[in-house]
Amino acid sequence: MLQGRKILLVIGGGIAAYKCLDLIRRLAERGASVTPVLTAAAQEFVTPLSVAALSGQKVYTDLFDLTDEAEMGHIQLSRAADLVVVAPATADLLAKMAGGHANDLATTLLMATDKPILVAPAMNVRMWDHPATQRNVATLKNDGIAFVGPNDGHMACGEFGAGRMAEPLEIVTAIDMALSDGPLKGKHIIVTSGPTHEPIDPVRYIANRSSGVQGTAIATALATLGADVTFITGPADAPRPQGVRVVEVETAHEMLEAVQKALPADAAVFAAAVADWRMAKAMDSKIKKDGTGAVPVLEFAENPDILKTVSQMKIGRPALVVGFAAETDDVIANATAKRLRKGCDWIVANDVSPETGIMGGAENAVTLITEEGQESWPRSGKTEVAERLARRIAEAL
Ligand code: CTP
């Protein structure tokens, strides 16, 4: 898939820069051509000579290198590639990108390019967790920039946590996805995933056992087929999917708002286990025992039904709306009725009785219910179920 693809690789100044040598090698093995750009700091970690030797290409370092400007101006350089990859993307480079700085060759190229950008951050865990970095990451994601990593692990500085650059092979996969010309290229698909948390008071909430694994796998499978995915997730354990736009929410109300903001879309897959009820009025302060043994009485209110709301939109409804039906009894009959009641096109029905181990487990056994009828898929890993569903969606759109 990478054969003949052109990648502009901006190498930032971090210890992880050494991994770029392996990344270049692996991209070259797959037939991609890599044009490297080194920031001044990157040259402290890897030499232009080793990068040139591995890439077999001229290495660009300086905005004011007149020879380069005569051969190929920076604007042209920024657009000659199919994809711009920034690895390692340091905290400083992310800040410059988010702020729109253009004071050296790398940042100028990143501002001038009209091509998609993929960044692989790498930094100390505290720098990654710093609100300034998180703000910059949110800004960049909002601008449509794709991220791969960072991963959790031991760092060169001796600390442990999030901030390790993704491994070269993970970056190759993310590049593959970003360049994918799959059947869903140009299609925007919304995926909801995970549980929602509905606050009772500032310290307690109502939740459910959804891990978010199935929704995450669906988002990944759709992105792999080339879709532009907006992944709207409640507080789930599953690691966030790569190569998609991630929107984190907590409550059903926030999830509905995020879905409405993400529209229009060609398709929407509602895999989230949305809480059906919330507190009619969440308490502003912690509910205390009063010493008498009296228990609080919680009054519930029904949450908006996101699947139903979108399925029944008169204007701007996605062409394909897919819901899930997690049932414990009469799975097919309940799911078939649910499809009609909610007005969605397809329902992916599954049996979540405790003995199946599906809720929160690694496998799923589903029946796809459409207007034409039903088909049962063999029990398999959630990734395989996701890939099958993604292929079906690609056929339908
Ligand atoms: N769903 C939703 N918003 C809600 C509740 C559910 O979008 N407030 C979506 C889920 O994401 C899923 C589908 O509706 O795609 C089915 O959810 P489920 O909880 O199984 O169905 P319910 O509507 O809650 O029906 P019941 O309680 O009768 O099982």
Image: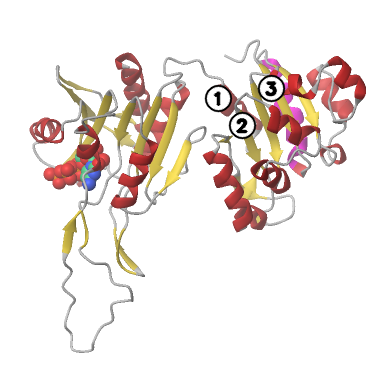
Kind of residue sitting beneath label 3: Arg
Q: On the image, which quarter does residue 165 sit in? A: top right
Residue 374 percent across, percent down from the top left: 15, 21
Q: Is residue 233 above or below residue 394?
A: below
Quarter of the view holding residue 66? top right
**Residue at horizontal 73 percent and vertical 41 percent from the top:** 101
Question: Main SS type for the magenta part?
Answer: helix
Which residue lies under the disc numbered 2? 118
- The reply to whether the magenta stretch includes residue 100 is no
Q: Earlier in the sequence, mark 1 or mark 3?
A: 3
Amino acid tagged 2: Leu
Number of marks in the image?
3
Residue 52 x, y percent position in the rendering: 84, 22
Q: Which mark is residue 178?
A: 1
Residue 312 percent location from the top left of the image: 19, 33
Give me the C-alpha separation between circle 2 and circle 1.
8 Å
- Give the number of the disc on residue 26: 3
Q: CA distance from mark 1 to mark 3?
A: 16 Å
Residue 265, position in %: x, y? 36, 28
- Residue contact between numbered discs 2 and 1, judged by CB atoms under 8 Å: yes
At 72% from the left and 56% from the top, the residue drawn is: 158
Q: Quadrant of ligand 1?
A: top left
Which residue range is magenta in the image? 16-29
